[in-house]
Image (cartoon, rainbow, N blue to C red):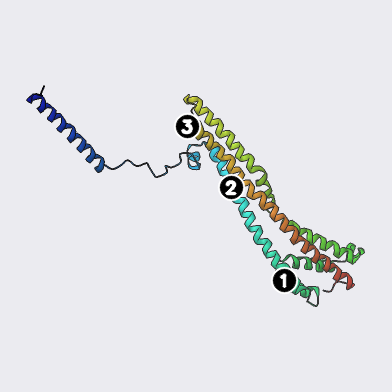
Amino acid sequence: MLPTHAQLRRFATSFLFWTLLAVCGGVAAQTLPAIKAPTGVSANPYGLSALWAEGDVVARGTLAVLLIMSLASWYVLVTKLIAQSRMGGQAAAAQSKFWGADTVRAGAEKLQKGSPYRYIAESALEATRKHGGLIGHVDLNIWVAQSIERAVATVHSRTQEGLAVLATVGSTAPFVGLFGTVWGIYNALVRIGASGQASIDKVAGPVGEALIMTAMGLAVAVPAVLGYNWLVRRNKVAMDTVRAFGSDLHTVLLASGTPRG
């Protein structure tokens, strides 16, 4: 049976409608921009800035203490390295200038003011000048040797200045950071309990911020401990040179019978 005229018209209308729909859909797919994944990295909502902004007085005070300890340890480390380098130059000057002089006084005057080697030489000369009265009953060589030993001990005491700061920072900074961690976790648990939500997104942020305190404590303590051990080693080498100078000076004074002023 052949289709009627009305059926053919309905079929042509439907075919034309679906053809136009397909064509419009293809054009729209070509003209509309494709959706791209975001390439930028969003700012980290958890970190030092968030810890400082959301922390209470105790948390901020702990951060301030760690910062002060770090600055103090680095200041001591830098200043002691400069002082030790200067002391090494003074040792070279004493080796080249002092022993070539005619007298101890002339050799001491060739050394730089503030030099530990000049201080030891002048201490030995001062001991010979004050050898009188009750001190005159003591053998001169023994008296001069004791004076040189006291001068060397004074120099050693000066080289140890500031090292107590490094030792204190290295031993206490981890515990200061641990205190901040415990306090931060306590506050985080209180906030989580008050909100009634214990999902990972609610727990990870506050606990992670609290653990930053421990990392900061270690970051402050490790350079202080390494710097302390390094400076102590360098001080030992420097003091060996100072003690050798004092021993040689005493030998020169002993060989001459009386100190040569």
The quadrant in which the N terminus is found is top left
Q: If you read the primary sequence from the N terminus, does the residue marked by circle 1 or circle 3 appear first?
A: 1
Q: In which quarter of the image is residue 87?
A: bottom right
> 193 above or below 22?
above
Residue at numbered disc 3 = 201
Residue at numbered disc 1 = 93
Would you say residue 182 is visible in this rendering?
yes
Residue sitting at the far bottom: 102
Residue found at x 55% / y 34%? 184
Q: Which amino acid does label 2 sit on?
A: Ile
Q: Does the CB distance between marks 2 and 3 fall below 8 Å?
A: no
Q: Does the CB distance between marks 1 and 2 fall below 8 Å?
A: no
Residue found at x 73% / y 74%? 110
- In the foreground, 150 or 247: 247
Q: Which amino acid does label 1 sit on?
A: Ala
Q: In which quarter of the image is residue 23?
A: top left
The quadrant in which the C terminus is found is bottom right
Q: If you read the primary sequence from the N terminus, does the residue marked by circle 2 or circle 3 appear first?
A: 2
Q: What element carries label 3?
A: helix
Give residue 68's mark.
2
Mark pair 1, 3: CA separation: 65 Å
Q: Is mark 1 on a helix, strand or loop?
A: helix
Mark pair 1, 2: CA separation: 38 Å
> 210 above or below 111?
above
Left or right of 44: which side holds 4?
Answer: left
Q: Residue 226: x, y in percent? A: 67, 51
